[in-house]
Image: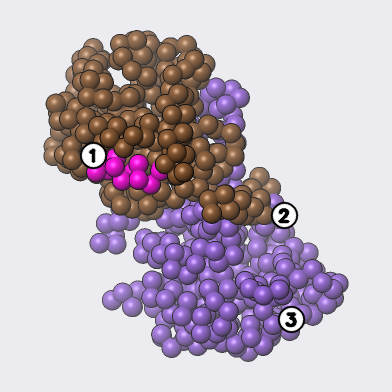
Chain colours: A purple, B brown
Amino acid sequence: MVEQTQHTKGAAFRKLHQGPEILLLPNAWDVASAVLMEQAGFPAIATTSSGVALANGFPDGEHIGRSRMLEIVARIAERVKVPVSADLEGGYGPQPDDVAETIRQAIGVGVVGANIEDSAHAGNQPLVPTPLAAERVRAGASTAKATGVPFVLNARIDVYLRDARGNEAERFAETIRRAHAYRDAGADSLFIPGVSDPTTIRRLATEIGLPLNVLGAFSGRSAPPLHELQALGVRRVTLGGSLAMYGWAMVLRALAEVRSTGRFEYATHAMSNAELNRLMRETEAQRA
Amino acid sequence: MVEQTQHTKGAAFRKLHQGPEILLLPNAWDVASAVLMEQAGFPAIATTSSGVALANGFPDGEHIGRSRMLEIVARIAERVKVPVSADLEGGYGPQPDDVAETIRQAIGVGVVGANIEDSAHAGNQPLVPTPLAAERVRAGASTAKATGVPFVLNARIDVYLRDARGNEAERFAETIRRAHAYRDAGADSLFIPGVSDPTTIRRLATEIGLPLNVLGAFSGRSAPPLHELQALGVRRVTLGGSLAMYGWAMVLRALAEVRSTGRFEYATHAMSNAELNRLMRETEAQRA
């Protein structure tokens, strides 16, 4: 019964990547944000590793560790009915087996998709070398396949984000090389953060050979609007940690206003305690 | 050394309740919000039980349980240098011993203040009868005293919040009766949520015989401005779960805007990933 539900969720999630509509997939960082996104009508939800890490007191980049990250992912996945895709950073370990174990545990807590990135979390290179990165993708994809749960392994290519060497042509060529290696290793979609130029996005969408995921916003920079991204061939737009970081920024702004004006104006825009409690009781009851 | 630090924090926190300035004490619900409030210069931080519960997927009202609540409180208390006061609901059990155990564990994770409320979390009365409620305050206060850590036991009186029976004169009289009983039992301050009328607030501040804590905002209703509250005799203003609920509301609004306009405008107002990561690394290093 539970397996069937996860199977159905996974199939629905895979379908959301096949167009023609672009998939806007918001990133939750705690249970409240996930439940509220579901209530707002989003057909699927992702998590944000930076948001989850920061909320729990860790800098981004695997400091939180696999078990604590999966604990939060599990709480989110068990409380919403829509498909959940987890941002699992570099898979919490350098080897293909580490990625496989992380994907196995993630599917065990109910997710039907995951990001695995090629940023290196150890060593002195910004990125994992392509052959090893591809083996890591292969390990994750084949682990997911072996469970029988329809799954979207979203392989993240961090060339634009992390690799400052070279010029634009080299970055593009390196991105395409990695894209094809990850596709051949079994990735279902490719996430390329750090691109916002329409021409580059269109070329990526055309050449990578899998559904393209870009960031709508990253550290204050915005991508082209959603309809333009769709026209450029993008299939999935995620928001990374920007929603969490927007919420915290708005709270700081509200506190600055209270201190400068003495007034509690912000509270007229807050959600009500009663409404949120009702939502949590309802979703808790659904689960039981 | 750790004990000395907690002792110093506790003494500083007690002093913040002695005026002449009113204490604006913001309520955090996760580590990021607490760290950001500290960075914004607040001299002390409270937690919000509703915010913590909702962030973790529970309705308010002790559903989260003592150990999970204290786990979050501990993560917050270990990451900020300023004094932390924990919202500990009804103390996670009906008996005075339950409150004593909760206060003992809370001091063990580093807090120097706590709210204990007289809302009943079981049975069919809205409030714990006054004699038992006073014994619960006594158990908490004497437990704190026995540790030697200077502490602010903030006893919450929920007559205005929960007890719909009677008229205003009866509610006021019942509040004063409870105030004096909790004061005599060893409370250090009294938290009376649900009042916003200036005349009532002034009379409470005059008659309760301890520092008065009111809510600046609750479920969209605002109290008089901070300087007016100070003139009325209020010593401490907290914000309950309203900051958390404002943050979530702003995120939902941002998502609605993305869906309706296709643009990611909100992201220009988000905090930067780099800035938050730096903050977490710095506070992590301080702790180590």
Determine the secondary structure under disc 1. Answer: helix
In the image, residue A113 above or below residue A262:
below
In the image, residue A167 above or below residue B265:
below
Q: Residues within 10 Å of mark 1 (few under 14, many from 20)?
A: many
Q: In the shown orientation, is residue A236 left or right of residue B120?
A: right
Most foreground residue, B36 or B249 = B36
Q: Which of the chains bears the disc numbered 1?
A: B
Determine the secondary structure under disc 3. Answer: helix
Badge 3 amino acid: Ile
Disc 1 versus disc 3: distance between alpha carbons?
A: 62 Å
Q: Residues within 10 Å of mark 2 (few under 14, many from 20)?
A: some
What residue does disc 2 label? A221
Q: Which mark is residue B208?
A: none
Q: Position of residue B210 (x, y in %)?
A: 33, 18
Q: Which residues are magenta?
A: B99-110
Q: Position of residue B107 (x, y in %)?
A: 35, 41
> Would residue B108 be counted in the magenta stretch?
yes
Badge 2 amino acid: Arg
In the image, residue B184 above or below residue B73:
above
Determine the secondary structure under disc 2. Answer: strand
Q: Position of residue B279 (x, y in %)?
A: 61, 49
What residue does disc 3 label? A176
What residue does disc 1 label? B100
Residue shown at 54% from the left, 57% from the top: A58
